[in-house]
Image (cartoon, rainbow, N blue to C red):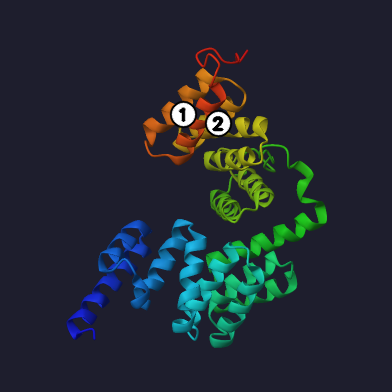
Amino acid sequence: MTTQVDQELLKKIEDQCQSLLSQGKAQESIDLMDRVSEDLSGFPSLYKLKGMARLLQGSNSEARLIFDELEGSFGDDSAFLNIYGVALRREKDLRSAQQIFQRALELSPDEPAILNNYGNLLIDLGKFSEARTLLEQALTLSPGYRDALQNLARLNSQIGVNTESLSQDSHEAPAEPPSSLNSIDEEAASDWLKLASIAQRDSNPEESLVFARKAVSHAPALAHAYKLAGEVLASLSRFDAAEQSLLYGILLGDPDANSLSNLGGICAQRGMYPLARLLLTKALALQPEHKVALKNLELLKSKAQGQNSNIGKPLF
């Protein structure tokens, strides 16, 4: 039986983990929890925090498995059901996510976070009218709620995409011109960029490109929008557009490991081995453990095997 001292210690560790998570320090939080026990299933509150940390890291499958185990312990906790629904949505289990959000909403019908996340899911399901009702209700309860505003913008964009055809400019890098050369709205651009990042994380590449274009239309010099679009385009094997977008991003901002790694991968695909090696080396100099750069370096070795990798295909 756990002693009172043990309970106090666990509560202290739980508070420390929550503080780390609020600062975005997911791995530090997990390391602290693992020092308590390698198997946290006997400590439901800490185990729930570990699931939240894994979700924050993008390890959606592991987070979902943890939450699956904990449903029996927290099935009547609307806050738990809310984050469980988010994990299910990220795992593309939309029907299960809908059931979980419905349960959460029954328990806490006036909780803005649940209304927002459920509304976001309904956009995925194409239930636009219901989504708008929930998002507007969230904003009525919490005016200025940023996530709800962004999801409402996503809803409006999605409705426009459905009527105007999402793929109209899908093979080009983001290049939607602003209505005026002097028309710059950095806050709006930041909001659109966040939506682009969420869509990329949720494996919706075309939607991510739509939002990246919107970001650039509000702030043409927003380097991160070009870089994100370049990553998305590279994942779709649209290498010419990806290269263009990544280079714009670097010119407008600074070289970073992600962009250099993606450019190196593109060069390796084209047989431009010396340039690919140079770019990947620069990426690893900035971030020695960069997984994509290391993977692309292996791709380079594979591509160059049996050939003179010091020559490769010329750029011009």
Q: Is residue 142 above or below residue 231?
A: below
Location of mark 1 (residue): 280
- CB atoms at circles 1 and 2 under 8 Å apart? yes
**Does 282 sit left or right of 238 as displayed?**
left
Location of mark 2 (residue): 265
**Disc 1 packing (10 Å; few <14; some 14–19; many ≥20):** many
**Residue at coordinates 52% horizontally, 62% vertically from top-left?**
61
Amino acid type of the residue that numbered disc 2 sits on in the rendered structure? Gly
**Does 289 sit left or right of 135 as displayed?**
left
Amino acid type of the residue that numbered disc 1 sits on in the rendered structure? Leu
**Residue at coordinates 55% horizontally, 76% vertically from top-left?**
114
Image coordinates for residue 76, horizontal then vertical, percent:
49, 86
**Residue at coordinates 37% horizontally, 30% vertically from top-left?**
285
**Disc 2 packing (10 Å; few <14; some 14–19; many ≥20):** many
Image coordinates for residue 151, horizontal then vertical, percent:
62, 64
Decide which of 302, 8 is in the foreground and name it: 302
Image coordinates for residue 214, horizontal then vertical, percent:
65, 48
